[in-house]
Image: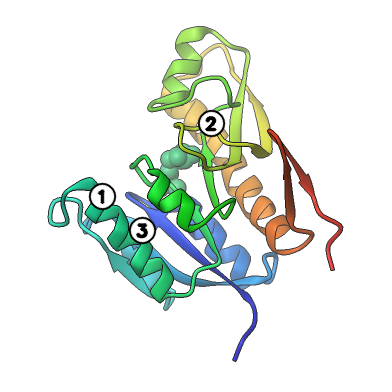
């Protein structure tokens, strides 16, 4: 039996970060294997992309599994069934409660399209443009009970250009998302992550 780490990826939509993680596992950049791609929306385009790569998928439909606590418990159950070590949120459009965070303590990562703590929440790129910042970027962080708030694992910055639209800025940031999310997950399974207060330090490795 393989002893490699097992990653569960949670999506709600197109799944481009999911693909970046699957690619990185496939080429050995991340010493782990994909355990399951789970969506809360049956129509998420990323599901078909995962299936095309032979990755197991699951759907816990928010419209069918209610209330919120029951939905989240079902997600936790599915992740446990697939023996997931690390949960990667990749465009998963739901806030997690203590139920899920407690089930995977310091083992849930998220990617957000801004330099946190600036511009948490929805439409981060639109918020950055409206604020007039000259630099934006993306952040990989551990998930805690507040939205886009947990300790920061990795960040990358990109310039905001004079004629940027939400689309052009989002595309520039997304390129960096696809780079730093696999790097952060590789670090998790490589040297390991050590959390000291709000600081995340890479461990000594094996
Ligand atoms: C990304 O911009 C990510 O930072 C945010 O949601 C978007 C998901 O895009 N959390 P994708 O589904 O990975 O393409």
Q: Is residue 151 above or below residue 133?
A: below
**Which type of secondary structure does the marked residue at label 2 adopt?**
loop
Please name the residue that numbered disc 1 is placed on.
Answer: 69
**Which type of secondary structure does the marked residue at label 1 adopt?**
helix
Q: CA distance from mark 1 to mark 3?
A: 24 Å
Whether the residue carrying mark 1 lies under 8 Å from ligand 1 is answered with no
Q: Nearer the viewer, residue 194 or 168?
A: 194
Q: Where residue 74 sits in the image (x, y, percent)?
A: 28, 62
Dot in front, 1 or 2: 1
Please name the residue that numbered disc 2 is placed on.
Answer: 149
At 62% from the left edge and 63% from the top edge, which residue is drawn?
24
Q: Earlier in the sequence, mark 3 or mark 2?
A: 3
Q: Is residue 50 above or below residue 199?
A: below
Please name the residue that numbered disc 3 is placed on.
Answer: 46
Relative horizontal placement of residue 89, taking residue 191 as reference (left or right): left
Relative horizontal placement of residue 60, taking residue 30 as reference (left or right): left
At 48% from the left edge and 31% from the top edge, which residue is drawn?
170
Mark 2 neighbour class, 10 Å CA radius: few under 14, some 14 to 19, many 20 or more? some
Whether the residue carrying mark 3 lies under 8 Å from ligand 1 is answered with yes
């Amino acid at each position: 039996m393989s002893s490699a780490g097992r990653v569960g990826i949670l999506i709600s939509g197109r799944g481009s970060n999911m693909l970046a993680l699957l690619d990185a596992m496939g080429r050995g950049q991340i010493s782990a294997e994909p355990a399951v791609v789970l969506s809360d929306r049956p129509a998420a385009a990323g599901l078909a992309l995962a299936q095309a790569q032979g990755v197991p998928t699951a759907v816990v439909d928010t419209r069918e599994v209610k209330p919120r606590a029951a939905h989240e418990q079902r997600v936790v159950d599915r992740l446990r069934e697939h023996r997931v070590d690390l949960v990667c949120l990749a465009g998963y459009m739901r806030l997690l409660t203590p139920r899920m965070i407690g089930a995977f303590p310091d083992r849930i990562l998220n990617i957000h399209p801004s330099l946190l703590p600036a511009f948490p929440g929805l439409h981060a790129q639109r918020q950055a443009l409206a604020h007039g910042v000259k630099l934006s970027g993306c952040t990989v962080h551990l998930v805690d009970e507040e939205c886009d708030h947990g300790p920061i694992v990795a960040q990358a910055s990109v310039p905001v250009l004079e004629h940027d639209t939400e689309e052009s800025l989002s595309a520039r940031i997304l390129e960096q998302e696809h780079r730093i999310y696999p790097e952060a997950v590789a670090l998790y399974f490589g040297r390991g992550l050590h959390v000291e207060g709000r600081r995340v330090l890479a461990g000594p490795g094996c």
